[in-house]
Image (cartoon, rainbow, N blue to C red):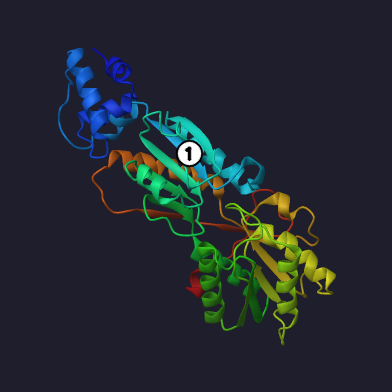
Amino acid sequence: MSINKVAKLAGVSNSTVSRVINNHPRVAPETVQSVKRAMKKLNYTPSDRRPGPKPQSRHRADKADIAFLVFGTTRERATPAFEDLLRGVSTGASANGLDLAFSHVPDAQHLPSNALDRHLDGVVLHGALPGPEVREKLRGLPAVWLMGNRRRPDFGDQVMPDSYTIGELAANYLVERGHQHVAFLNLDGDHWPLRLYQQAFLAAAQIAGVQIDSVVLSGPPDAPGYWAGHSPAKVQSLVSQFLGRNPRPTGCFVADDMQIALIQPALQAAGVEIGPGKTELVSCNNERPYLIGLNPKPAVIDIRTEAIGRRGIEQLLWRLEHPGVIERVVTTVEPVIVLPDAPAGHVAPVATADVR
């Protein structure tokens, strides 16, 4: 008698049957009873009744069902980086033989009724934090959040960019370019990861002995949803505050590519000369469509979004194989800096050790 027949009769996945057999602590009681009834009806006896996690090879032989849920977004507002994230999740799932379902959940307060109908073994999550009711539904599943949320999630593991290294890379780049007065520019001051960028950038620049400054606007984004939108008035407010600095910073770290696509042209329209030996900018994310119209092109920090997606799948597999570990695990992926007009795949050898 195969495990497939038990799963089919119980209406669950093969891996869910395996988790019941192995006394997995996060299987719903009604699911456990359904599986046990099916096993009894089919006279199915597992060959290995040892409790607890089984070797990795055994778990992966049972094809797991997982979902990638993206909260507070629509397909129309997806950023270029999200395409890379989705590619990483998809390739990671395929490489590990996982069944992957993908859903946008525009209203983070309500989970579609069919989202958990597949008897999922685990979920990877991205976007806005869901409401209390949705969180309670998801807490019972192994979960891994991808990227840095606007607010920190209160459940599940997380794979995200290394925010502190991002800030250090930006500071080191500008210091090595000879700038003695640097600033962090940000239109979205309430975004938690961007605040970490700022902290690391200012700390690294201060250790390097240069003058530091920040121009940061707080308040909600000007467009709804997880991905921020910024009005011309907000951009102009930031530019006006920057122009009012005396002395004015000559090296600036702009928090992300969506912002630099708005801020650099506004600075140039206000008479600020951008480029080597003038005011130099460095941005973050490496979302090329935002950078196409900029002249000159800025240096940009590649947060390696596709790698984050792949690593998220690996972390979910680890969580499935270690259900008894109660500690939440946060993993960061190291960024790299890409020089202006560098050939594809080229990164700058900008060290961070000297500013830690």
Q: Is residue 274 left or right of residue 287?
A: right
Q: Closer to the camera, 348 or 335?
A: 335
Above or below, 94 against 296 in this view is: above
Q: Is residue 53 left or right of residue 169?
A: left
Q: Quadrant of the N terminus?
A: top left
Q: Residue at left 60%, top 70%?
A: 218
Q: Residue at left 57%, top 84%?
A: 209
Above or below, 9 against 114 in this view is: above
Q: Closer to the camera, 136 or 262?
A: 136
Q: Position of residue 330 (x, y in %)?
A: 39, 55
Q: Is residue 265 left or right of residue 344?
A: right
Kindly tell me whether residue 343 is visible in this rendering.
Answer: no
Q: Quadrant of residue 213?
A: bottom right
Circle 1 packing at 10 Å, graded few (<14), some (14-19), many (20+), is many
Residue furthest to the bottom in view is 246
Q: Closer to the camera, 294 or 261?
A: 261
Q: Quadrant of residue 26?
A: top left
Q: Residue at left 72%, top 73%?
A: 237
Above or below, 76 against 95 in this view is: below
Q: Closer to the camera, 289 or 192?
A: 192
Kindly tell me whether residue 241 is visible in this rendering.
Answer: yes
Mark 1 highlights which residue? 68
Instruction: Give the amino acid type for the residue marked by disc 1 in the picture.
Output: Phe
Q: Position of residue 80 (x, y in %)?
A: 65, 47
Count of numbered badges drawn on the protein: 1
Q: Secondary structure at mark 1?
A: strand
Q: Position of residue 169 (x, y in %)?
A: 57, 66
Above or below, 38 against 240 in this view is: above
